[in-house]
Image: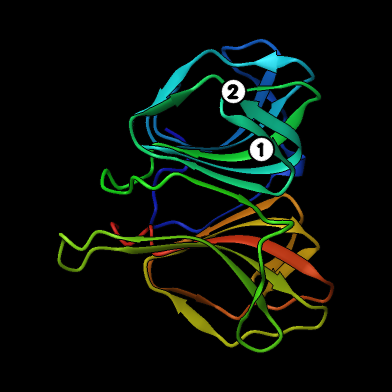
Amino acid sequence: MLNMDFSQRIVIDTNLMEWLPSPSGGVRRKPLEREAAESGHTTSVVEYTAQAKFPTHPHPLGEEIFVLDGVFSDETGDFPAGSYIRNPPASQHAPFSRQGCRIFVKLNQFNKRDSQQVNINTHTAPWLDGIGGLKVMPLHAFKDSSIQGARHEHTALVKWPAGELFQPHQHVGGEEIYVISGEFRDENGCYPAGSWIRSPHQSMHCPYVNEDTIILVKTGHLALV
């Protein structure tokens, strides 16, 4: 197991990590959290070299992908940098990349009822006005209405203009951030592009930026602790 205590705050600069081999030649990865060697809850940065492919495999509890660079592909199509993909529980595919790519990927972390297939090109999807100068691009939201008090999960891109300071706030259900571009900051430190930050349920901070910054944010999914 790796970083599976969700009550702990985790900060990782993935730029400083070594690539590790995967079971498929030409595919390497940087594991951020992992329940088991090749199964269960997993979050990683994965690199496909040109012409690399991965055998057909199932997603028992779903797969969530953000394409960081290059073009990621499977039998359903080609997904360029900036693509956000959700493959629901019980889906399967045989991914590959003709020119090579890097992806941020989360495996086996869906509610079984979260069956929505999602494919968004974030370069063409609209930005919405957020608090202050922030721009927000909602990507996915889910709440299991069959369970009283169930977590309400939200995933979005958030664009921060240079000099933006956000109000201090608490993370009910936790918060997970991957810095896409720029540099994200709070009172605890500075996080360059490629940083992964997981903050537990009920944690607090006061974030800000000095330069234009884009982050991928997921909230509400860590309330189970």
At 82% across and 76% down in the image, what residue appears? 210
Depth check: give the residue in front, 27 or 112.
Answer: 112
Work out whether mark 1 precedes mark 2 in sequence or the reverse, and give the earlier one.
Answer: 2
Q: Which amino acid does label 2 sit on?
A: Pro
Residue 22 in the image, given as x and y percentages of width and height? 60, 17
**Figure quadrant of residue 110:** top left
Q: Examine the rendered structure and indicate whether residue 75 appears above or below residue 187.
A: above
- Residue holding disc 1: 103
User: Which residue is painted at 58% across and 37% down in the image?
Assistant: 44
Mark 1 neighbour density, 10 Å: few (under 14) some (14–19) many (20 or more): many
Nearest the eye: 186 or 167: 167
**Screen quadrant of the N terminus:** top left
Q: In this view, does 202 lie above or below 176?
A: below
Question: With 53 as the anchor, is 213 left or right in this view?
Answer: right
Residue matched to label 2: 95
The x and y percentages for residue 62 are 40, 37
SS state under label 2: loop
Give residue 51's quadrant in the image: top right
